[in-house]
Image: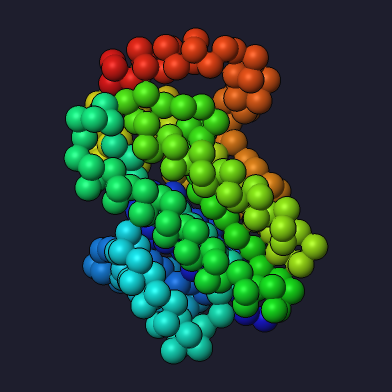
Amino acid sequence: MSNTALITGASGGIGRELAILHAKAGGDLILVARSTQKLQELKTELEVAYGIKAHVMPADLSVSTQVVTLMEQIKEQDLQVDVLINNAGFGLLGEFSQRSLDDQLNMVDLNVRALTQLTHLCLPQMIARGSGQILQVSSSASFVPGPMMAVYYATKAYVTSFSLAIAEEVKEKGITVTTLCPGPVATNFFKTAGVQAQSVQQAANSPRKVAEAGYRAMLSGDLEVIDRLPLKLGIKAIVPFIPTSVILKASHRFMKQR
Protein backbone atom coordinates (compact mmCIF):
# COMPACT_ATOMS: atom_id res chain seq x y z
CA MET A 1 0.00 0.00 0.00
CA SER A 2 1.37 3.39 -1.03
CA ASN A 3 2.34 5.76 1.77
CA THR A 4 4.28 8.53 0.05
CA ALA A 5 4.57 11.94 1.70
CA LEU A 6 5.29 15.15 -0.18
CA ILE A 7 7.08 17.46 2.28
CA THR A 8 7.94 21.07 1.46
CA GLY A 9 10.72 22.87 3.27
CA ALA A 10 12.25 19.45 3.89
CA SER A 11 15.90 20.52 3.96
CA GLY A 12 15.91 21.60 7.60
CA GLY A 13 14.00 22.37 10.77
CA ILE A 14 10.49 20.99 11.19
CA GLY A 15 10.35 19.73 7.61
CA ARG A 16 13.47 17.62 8.01
CA GLU A 17 12.19 16.16 11.28
CA LEU A 18 8.84 15.32 9.67
CA ALA A 19 10.67 13.54 6.86
CA ILE A 20 12.60 11.47 9.41
CA LEU A 21 9.39 10.55 11.25
CA HIS A 22 7.66 9.45 8.05
CA ALA A 23 10.68 7.41 6.96
CA LYS A 24 10.82 5.73 10.39
CA ALA A 25 7.17 4.76 9.86
CA GLY A 26 8.17 3.07 6.59
CA GLY A 27 6.83 5.71 4.25
CA ASP A 28 8.42 6.92 1.03
CA LEU A 29 9.15 10.60 0.50
CA ILE A 30 9.07 13.40 -2.04
CA LEU A 31 11.49 15.95 -0.61
CA VAL A 32 11.06 19.55 -1.73
CA ALA A 33 13.16 22.64 -0.92
CA ARG A 34 15.50 25.00 -2.74
CA SER A 35 18.74 23.32 -1.58
CA THR A 36 19.54 20.33 -3.78
CA GLN A 37 22.59 19.36 -1.73
CA LYS A 38 20.75 19.25 1.59
CA LEU A 39 17.92 17.24 0.06
CA GLN A 40 20.35 14.75 -1.48
CA GLU A 41 22.09 14.32 1.87
CA LEU A 42 18.76 13.72 3.59
CA LYS A 43 17.69 11.28 0.88
CA THR A 44 20.85 9.20 1.34
CA GLU A 45 20.57 9.27 5.12
CA LEU A 46 16.95 8.11 5.20
CA GLU A 47 17.23 5.50 2.47
CA VAL A 48 20.20 3.87 4.22
CA ALA A 49 18.70 4.09 7.70
CA TYR A 50 15.12 3.01 6.94
CA GLY A 51 15.11 1.27 3.56
CA ILE A 52 12.57 3.66 2.07
CA LYS A 53 12.63 5.50 -1.25
CA ALA A 54 13.13 9.26 -1.24
CA HIS A 55 12.69 11.42 -4.33
CA VAL A 56 14.53 14.75 -4.43
CA MET A 57 12.69 17.54 -6.26
CA PRO A 58 14.31 20.95 -5.72
CA ALA A 59 11.98 23.91 -6.27
CA ASP A 60 11.41 27.50 -5.26
CA LEU A 61 7.75 27.28 -4.34
CA SER A 62 7.36 31.05 -4.14
CA VAL A 63 7.35 30.86 -7.96
CA SER A 64 3.96 29.60 -9.13
CA THR A 65 5.30 27.94 -12.27
CA GLN A 66 7.72 25.87 -10.22
CA VAL A 67 4.82 24.46 -8.21
CA VAL A 68 3.20 23.37 -11.46
CA THR A 69 6.49 21.88 -12.67
CA LEU A 70 6.85 19.99 -9.38
CA MET A 71 3.43 18.38 -9.76
CA GLU A 72 4.22 17.51 -13.39
CA GLN A 73 7.42 15.76 -12.27
CA ILE A 74 5.48 13.79 -9.69
CA LYS A 75 2.99 12.71 -12.36
CA GLU A 76 5.73 11.83 -14.85
CA GLN A 77 7.42 9.59 -12.28
CA ASP A 78 4.08 7.92 -11.57
CA LEU A 79 4.19 8.87 -7.90
CA GLN A 80 1.14 9.11 -5.67
CA VAL A 81 0.90 11.74 -2.95
CA ASP A 82 -0.79 10.01 -0.03
CA VAL A 83 0.35 12.58 2.52
CA LEU A 84 0.83 16.29 1.83
CA ILE A 85 2.86 18.26 4.37
CA ASN A 86 2.95 21.98 3.60
CA ASN A 87 5.80 23.16 5.80
CA ALA A 88 7.71 25.72 3.70
CA GLY A 89 7.48 29.30 4.90
CA PHE A 90 9.37 32.24 6.42
CA GLY A 91 8.86 35.48 8.35
CA LEU A 92 10.35 38.97 8.48
CA LEU A 93 10.64 41.40 11.39
CA GLY A 94 10.11 45.14 10.90
CA GLU A 95 7.50 47.78 10.22
CA PHE A 96 5.45 46.98 7.13
CA SER A 97 6.16 50.34 5.49
CA GLN A 98 9.92 49.98 6.04
CA ARG A 99 10.40 46.45 4.71
CA SER A 100 10.91 45.67 1.04
CA LEU A 101 7.57 45.16 -0.68
CA ASP A 102 9.08 42.46 -2.90
CA ASP A 103 10.29 40.52 0.15
CA GLN A 104 6.86 40.72 1.77
CA LEU A 105 5.02 39.68 -1.38
CA ASN A 106 7.46 36.79 -1.71
CA MET A 107 6.43 35.78 1.82
CA VAL A 108 2.77 35.83 0.78
CA ASP A 109 3.62 33.76 -2.30
CA LEU A 110 5.37 31.06 -0.27
CA ASN A 111 3.33 31.04 2.93
CA VAL A 112 -0.09 31.41 1.29
CA ARG A 113 -0.19 30.91 -2.45
CA ALA A 114 2.12 27.88 -2.67
CA LEU A 115 0.32 26.13 0.19
CA THR A 116 -3.05 26.83 -1.41
CA GLN A 117 -1.83 25.75 -4.83
CA LEU A 118 -0.36 22.46 -3.63
CA THR A 119 -3.45 21.66 -1.57
CA HIS A 120 -5.66 22.30 -4.59
CA LEU A 121 -3.48 20.21 -6.88
CA CYS A 122 -3.27 17.23 -4.51
CA LEU A 123 -6.84 17.09 -3.21
CA PRO A 124 -8.62 15.83 -6.38
CA GLN A 125 -6.54 12.65 -6.46
CA MET A 126 -7.06 12.09 -2.74
CA ILE A 127 -10.81 12.58 -3.14
CA ALA A 128 -10.87 10.15 -6.07
CA ARG A 129 -9.09 7.51 -3.94
CA GLY A 130 -11.16 8.26 -0.86
CA SER A 131 -8.05 8.63 1.30
CA GLY A 132 -5.35 11.11 2.16
CA GLN A 133 -3.76 13.11 4.94
CA ILE A 134 -2.73 16.76 4.88
CA LEU A 135 -0.62 18.53 7.50
CA GLN A 136 -0.48 22.32 7.21
CA VAL A 137 2.26 23.97 9.26
CA SER A 138 0.84 27.24 10.55
CA SER A 139 1.80 29.06 13.77
CA SER A 140 0.46 30.21 17.11
CA ALA A 141 0.91 33.64 15.50
CA SER A 142 -2.18 32.86 13.42
CA PHE A 143 -4.49 33.62 16.35
CA VAL A 144 -3.54 37.28 16.89
CA PRO A 145 -2.43 40.24 14.76
CA GLY A 146 1.31 40.94 14.87
CA PRO A 147 2.66 44.46 14.65
CA MET A 148 6.29 44.42 13.39
CA MET A 149 5.57 41.10 11.65
CA ALA A 150 2.24 42.07 10.14
CA VAL A 151 2.47 40.10 6.90
CA TYR A 152 3.84 36.95 8.53
CA TYR A 153 1.10 36.85 11.16
CA ALA A 154 -1.51 37.54 8.48
CA THR A 155 -0.25 34.72 6.26
CA LYS A 156 -0.44 32.28 9.15
CA ALA A 157 -3.96 33.45 10.01
CA TYR A 158 -4.86 32.55 6.46
CA VAL A 159 -3.24 29.12 6.73
CA THR A 160 -5.15 28.24 9.90
CA SER A 161 -8.51 29.54 8.68
CA PHE A 162 -8.16 28.00 5.23
CA SER A 163 -7.01 24.63 6.55
CA LEU A 164 -9.79 24.31 9.12
CA ALA A 165 -12.37 25.14 6.46
CA ILE A 166 -10.94 22.61 4.01
CA ALA A 167 -10.90 19.99 6.77
CA GLU A 168 -14.66 20.37 7.16
CA GLU A 169 -15.22 20.13 3.40
CA VAL A 170 -13.35 16.83 3.01
CA LYS A 171 -14.00 15.05 6.31
CA GLU A 172 -16.68 12.82 4.77
CA LYS A 173 -14.40 11.92 1.85
CA GLY A 174 -11.81 9.90 3.73
CA ILE A 175 -9.36 12.80 4.02
CA THR A 176 -8.05 14.56 7.12
CA VAL A 177 -6.52 18.03 7.29
CA THR A 178 -4.50 18.86 10.40
CA THR A 179 -3.18 22.32 11.23
CA LEU A 180 0.01 22.54 13.29
CA CYS A 181 0.26 25.83 15.24
CA PRO A 182 3.54 25.84 17.19
CA GLY A 183 4.99 28.61 19.30
CA PRO A 184 8.63 29.64 18.76
CA VAL A 185 10.74 26.85 17.23
CA ALA A 186 14.55 26.59 17.38
CA THR A 187 15.24 26.76 13.64
CA ASN A 188 16.79 29.22 11.18
CA PHE A 189 13.44 31.07 11.25
CA PHE A 190 14.77 33.64 13.74
CA LYS A 191 17.86 34.38 11.64
CA THR A 192 15.79 34.81 8.48
CA ALA A 193 13.21 36.94 10.25
CA GLY A 194 15.81 39.13 11.91
CA VAL A 195 14.75 38.26 15.46
CA GLN A 196 17.77 38.55 17.78
CA ALA A 197 16.23 38.39 21.29
CA GLN A 198 17.67 35.58 23.39
CA SER A 199 14.47 35.42 25.46
CA VAL A 200 12.49 34.33 22.40
CA GLN A 201 15.09 31.87 21.21
CA GLN A 202 15.49 30.35 24.68
CA ALA A 203 11.71 29.79 24.86
CA ALA A 204 11.72 27.99 21.52
CA ASN A 205 10.75 24.35 21.30
CA SER A 206 12.93 21.89 19.38
CA PRO A 207 11.99 21.10 15.75
CA ARG A 208 11.83 17.42 16.68
CA LYS A 209 9.26 17.92 19.43
CA VAL A 210 7.12 20.15 17.22
CA ALA A 211 7.33 17.66 14.35
CA GLU A 212 6.40 14.79 16.65
CA ALA A 213 3.35 16.69 17.90
CA GLY A 214 2.26 17.51 14.37
CA TYR A 215 2.87 14.06 12.92
CA ARG A 216 1.08 12.36 15.80
CA ALA A 217 -1.91 14.69 15.41
CA MET A 218 -2.00 14.06 11.66
CA LEU A 219 -2.06 10.30 12.16
CA SER A 220 -4.92 10.73 14.63
CA GLY A 221 -6.83 12.95 12.22
CA ASP A 222 -6.91 15.88 14.66
CA LEU A 223 -8.08 19.23 13.33
CA GLU A 224 -5.51 21.36 15.12
CA VAL A 225 -2.51 21.01 17.39
CA ILE A 226 -0.67 23.60 19.48
CA ASP A 227 2.62 22.11 20.64
CA ARG A 228 2.57 23.16 24.32
CA LEU A 229 -0.30 23.06 26.82
CA PRO A 230 0.37 26.47 28.47
CA LEU A 231 0.43 28.09 25.04
CA LYS A 232 -2.78 26.33 24.06
CA LEU A 233 -4.52 27.44 27.25
CA GLY A 234 -3.38 31.01 26.71
CA ILE A 235 -4.56 31.14 23.11
CA LYS A 236 -7.86 29.37 23.63
CA ALA A 237 -8.90 30.38 27.14
CA ILE A 238 -7.35 33.79 27.77
CA VAL A 239 -6.63 35.68 24.53
CA PRO A 240 -10.29 35.67 23.33
CA PHE A 241 -11.28 37.71 26.39
CA ILE A 242 -8.59 40.38 26.07
CA PRO A 243 -9.54 43.55 24.14
CA THR A 244 -7.90 43.70 20.72
CA SER A 245 -6.36 47.10 21.48
CA VAL A 246 -4.58 45.62 24.50
CA ILE A 247 -3.27 42.66 22.49
CA LEU A 248 -2.00 44.98 19.77
CA LYS A 249 -0.22 47.28 22.21
CA ALA A 250 1.40 44.41 24.11
CA SER A 251 2.43 42.61 20.92
CA HIS A 252 3.86 45.79 19.43
CA ARG A 253 5.87 46.59 22.55
CA PHE A 254 7.20 43.03 22.72
CA MET A 255 8.25 42.89 19.07
CA LYS A 256 9.96 46.29 19.22
CA GLN A 257 12.37 44.74 21.71
CA ARG A 258 13.37 41.98 19.34
Asked which quadrant contains residue 124, the reply is bottom right
> Could you tell me which residue is drawn at 59 percent across and 36 percent down?
226
> Could you tell me which residue is drawn at 65 percent across and 55 percent down?
166
* Colour approach in the figure: rainbow
> Could you tell me which residue is drawn at 28 percent across and 21 percent down?
258
Whether residue 24 is visible: no
Tell whether 9 sits left or right of 122.
left
Whether 106 is drawn above or below 6: the answer is: above
Q: As rendered, which of 228 and 107 lies closer to the eye?
A: 107
Whether residue 192 is visible: yes
Q: Position of residue 183 (x, y in %)?
A: 48, 32
Tell whether 67 sits left or right of 224.
left
> Could you tell me which residue is drawn at 41 percent across and 50 percent down?
111
Q: As rendered, which of 150 and 136 lies closer to the eye?
A: 150
Q: As rendered, which of 114 and 187 lies closer to the eye?
A: 114
Q: Position of residue 17 (x, y in %)?
A: 45, 53
Q: Quadrant of the N terminus?
A: bottom right
Q: Could you tell me how many numbered marks the image carries?
A: 0
Asked which quadrant contains residue 151, the reply is top left
